[in-house]
Amino acid sequence: MLGQMQNWPLLVSRFLSHASAAHGHREIVTKLVEGGTHRCTWHDIERRSKQLAQALNRLGCKPGDRIATLAWNGHRHLEVWYGTSGSERVCHTLNPRLFVDQLIYIINHAEDSVLLFDTTFAPLVEKLSPHLPTVKHYIALCPRAHVPDIKVPGGVLCYEDMIAAENGDYTWPSFDENTASSLCYTSGTTGNPKGVLYSHRSTVLHTYGACMADTMGMTASSVILPVVPMFHANAWAIPYGAAAVGCKLVFNGPHFDAATLQQLIIDEGVTFTAAVPTVWLAMLQHLEATGTGLGNLQTVTIGGSAAPRIMIDTFQTKYGIKVGHAWGMTETSPLGTIGTLTPEILAMNKEVQLDAQCKQGRRIFGVDLKITGPDGKALPHDGIAFGNLKVRGPWVVARYFKGEGGDILDAEGWFDSGDVATMDPHGFLHITDRAKDVIKSGGEWISSIDIENAALAHPAVQEAAVIGVVHPKWDERPLLIIILKAGMSATKQNILDVVAPQVAKWWLPDDVAFVDELPHGATGKLNKMELRKQFANHVLSVS
Ligand code: ADP
């Protein structure tokens, strides 16, 4: 027997219509690329998104066309998100930090027909354009006075002129909720980047999951600064969730320095923010150096890479800001788990709570998780057994765009995340490594992430990376690579003394190397493949 309720297709445009109707006056604040601060409302965003949809019609864009963006977080980028997806096109967010060759590959693979860009990226766009046969229109996200003087086929169109030419008298179309809404490519640390094609349905369900109190807990009273870029896995659903709850949004535009972010957080009354650990590393150093704080900030979600214990502890103990440590991937929309504490853990002491928060958290309703051994059988949730992390659910990828990589699900629909993890009896997932970064020593696995976190407890350590280097007896042994904080010093032994009590004895790195820089990928993660190459001939010197 079927239920007898109305059936709305779950469409992304519903978020915006709701925000405009129920929270229309709430502000969207942007630090503009062209300088100054811009203020508008959800009502304005909906009107202008509709004007963009009309402008895309005028350009001849069809349903299903991929419309690319090379843009920072800002009100115009938000309008492009809603204006494209809402009008049945696919919003393809490009990560400007990728190599030029990767961007060319991605744009051609996606067959983008329009490229909207912030003027910051004008030189990049000029360099890319001769290699992009499918791109018919280049639109600069700025007013006429700031349109860059670059040579691209067909010339540069001005976004503000295009918006001004339309009246906004437009009704969001209704269509199948399984229609593609947006496209995001993985950074492709192995092989070519692959496209994850989100649907309206997956996006709406994921947003419900993201908004829940135990996930990111967005409410109408929140003031949210998503430092995480809109090109990094849809800014972890924040621009959708913010519209769903109708809260104030603050965008940092091209500014990522700690002082500007701090100023925005204080001036705009930001209560919640989210970003990768490197952003918070710089912020905590800035706060320490200046002896200042973060105004009314109450919660920060940290994900993308493991949040170090010292970072979580400092936020909470020194600044009274609650940390939500989350795990996810482009392929999981991205939210998979988050470290909200359960009543059982809250009843325990602070150290136990912190131990739990250093893990990547518990699964969100809508995400099924399991860890499996080499035989594919599920491993116990004892917090000890390491296994391959597998996920499934309505916002987990089913196949990559254009079928790249072939069948990626097993017979039961599980997607192998490529991560190695343990699961404890309280359901907390602990990511120990990317499968390809795992260190195998004497047939046993060593977690590079755990050692990195242990090293960060040394006050002179700015950043730490651990890789396996070849060892004649043990196959591989861990090498700890350190960047020291400016003006501070430490010996190898000093650092190992801090690490030793925090890890199993046989996990202790065989050597410590000091470097000025560590290689990072386009989403800020350590590029361990590159590090392994750099240290391929390293001779272990401590033992
Ligand atoms: P990429 O940057 O490679 O395109 P993602 O941003 O989707 O892709 O990265 C996903 C990966 O990032 C995960 O599979 C995992 O290895 C890592 N990751 C994400 N969050 C965390 C976390 N909290 N702790 C440790 N690793 C994480």
Image: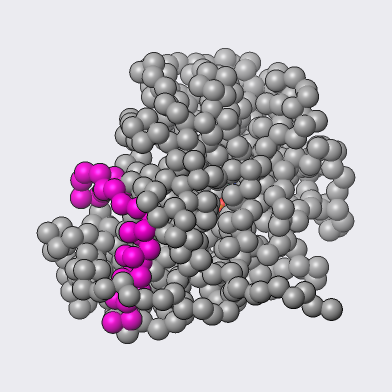
> Which residue corresponds to the image point at 21% horizontal and 77% vertical from the top-left?
153
- In this picture, residue 374 sits left or right of residue 226: right
Start and end of the magenta stretch?
30-58
> Which residue corresponds to the image point at 59% horizontal and 69% vertical from the top-left?
10
Q: Looking at this view, is 133 or 256 the one in front?
A: 256
Q: Looking at this view, is 412 or 163 the one in front?
A: 163
Query: Quarter-wise, where is residue 411 in the image?
Result: bottom right
Is residue 288 in view?
A: yes
Note whether 176 is above or below 206 in the view shown: below
Is residue 104 in view?
A: no
How many numbered discs?
0
Residue 39 magenta: yes
Residue 292 magenta: no
Quick one: quadrant of the C terminus?
top right
- In this picture, residue 334 sits left or right of residue 123: right
- The x, y position of residue 159, in whole percent, is 24, 66
Note whether 64 is above or below 211 in the view shown: below
- In this picture, residue 189 sits left or right of residue 145: right
- The x, y position of residue 148, in whole percent, is 16, 61
> Which residue corresponds to the image point at 55% horizontal and 76% vertical from the top-left?
179
- The structure's colour scheme is one colour
Quick one: quadrant of the N terminus?
bottom right
- The x, y position of residue 213, in whole percent, is 63, 43
- The x, y position of residue 169, in whole percent, is 32, 75
Note whether 344 is above or below 522 in the view shown: above
> Which residue corresponds to the image point at 54% horizontal and 27% vertical from the top-left?
321
- In this picture, residue 200 sits left or right of residue 262: right
